[in-house]
Amino acid sequence: MDALLADPRPLTTTYSPARPVNLRQTVGPLLRGVHEPTMRLTPNGFWRAIRTPEGTATLHAEARAGGRVEATAWGAGAGWALDALPGLLGDGDDWSGFDLARIPPLAEVRRQHPGLWLTSTALVFESLVPTILEQKVTTIEARRAWRYLVAKYGEIPPGPAPEGMRVQPSPRQWRLVPSWEWHRAGVGPNRSRAVLAAAAGAAGLDRLAHPGAPAGPGDARAPGYDGVLEKLQTVHGIGPWTAAETSQRSHGHPDAVSVGDFHLAAHVGWVLIGKPVDDEGMLELLEPWRGHRQRLVRLILASGVPKPKFGPRATIQDHRWH
């Protein structure tokens, strides 16, 4: 009903950040593959279909001359989406205390990518669901499941969103997905139960996106970065890796490290010391930059230094019905 009552006219704004911003690099972590149903990259910007606290919205942002960003939003949540644009483009991400003097190659990477910032969507549940689907499976499996479920149960976004885009299902819609559809999507019971647990507590999870705001009637104030990681892990099926990957996107968490990632530790080790390491070794290497460890990881990933393939690839399992 809200969508029917919403003003069909788009809202527009021009955002002039005080520093260079590369839109694609900054929001890139939100993209789950080239066929991501909730997002599209353009040569100079992006489209996003989102479910805001005020309703669904389509957001289109493009970089213009002089560092300006022109943005247009449609739908009941259009005003919220435009208000959240600076955070989405890394406005709250402060690298001033991040000293790269000990690693000149990564200092050079930063010099080459001055517009790379940590995005903050302020939408915890939005980032949590696709991250749960990525637990302990290959990227191909996770993205296939995400595309299938969002295409079938998501909503057509408001406004002129590109063909095929969808707003991911609401918490209630996720809870109504029947068991056989999880199976057809290739999502096992552990991951589907975790999504349902997250959906049951979605309202509380999204309150975590506002560290300075009251968490609700009778609650303490919402926690800071460390508290967010702890709170996320109180949800059934959410461990350190899922909490870190979620908070990196929802909060722009500058120190969240994805411990347990199949590839990350070896990649960090290869770039920093020329050989692969395990999670313990990765944390030891990153320790001098505590407080900025996610920023360091983003530079490592942006460096273009490939990680040699150590060992066999994971086998893709297909448990879907045909």
Image (spheres, rainbow, N blue to C red):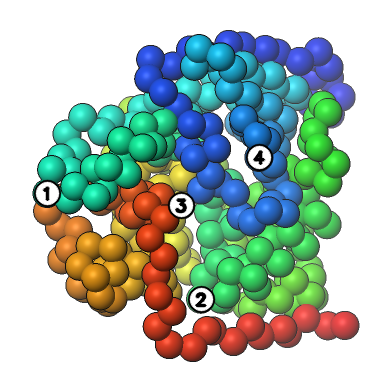
Instruction: Name the residue beneath numbered marker 3.
Output: 246
Indicate which disc residue 273 carries: none
Disc 3 residue type? Answer: Thr
Say which label, 1 or 4, has the lower sequence index. 4
Label 1 secondary element: loop
Instruction: Name the residue beneath numbered marker 2.
Output: 136
Instruction: Name the residue beneath numbered marker 1.
Output: 102
Say which label, 3 or 2, has the lower sequence index. 2
Q: How many marks?
A: 4
Q: CA gap, disc 2 to disc 4? A: 27 Å
Say which label, 2 or 4, has the lower sequence index. 4
Please report the residue visible at 15 percent of the width from the left and 40 percent of the height from the top: 99
Instruction: Name the residue beneath numbered marker 4.
Output: 41
Disc 1 residue type? Answer: Arg
Q: CA gap, disc 1 to disc 4? A: 34 Å
Q: Residues within 10 Å of mark 4 (few under 14, many from 20)?
A: some
Residue 62, image x, y percentages? 63, 24
C-beta proximity under 8 Å, tags 1 and 3: no
- Vertical comparison of 62 with 313: above or below: above
Residue 175, image x, y percentages? 70, 58
Residue 296, image x, y percentages? 28, 50
Asked whether 177 or 247 is in front, the reply is: 247
Disc 4 residue type? Answer: Leu
Q: Quadrant of residue 183?
A: bottom right
Q: Residues within 10 Å of mark 2 (few under 14, many from 20)?
A: few
Please tell me whether mark 4 or mark 3 is closer to you in this view.
Answer: 4
Please tell me whether mark 1 or mark 4 is closer to you in this view.
Answer: 1
Q: CA gap, disc 1 to disc 2? A: 34 Å
Please tell me whether mark 1 or mark 3 is closer to you in this view.
Answer: 1
Say which label, 1 or 2, has the lower sequence index. 1
Q: In which quarter of the image is the C terminus?
A: bottom right
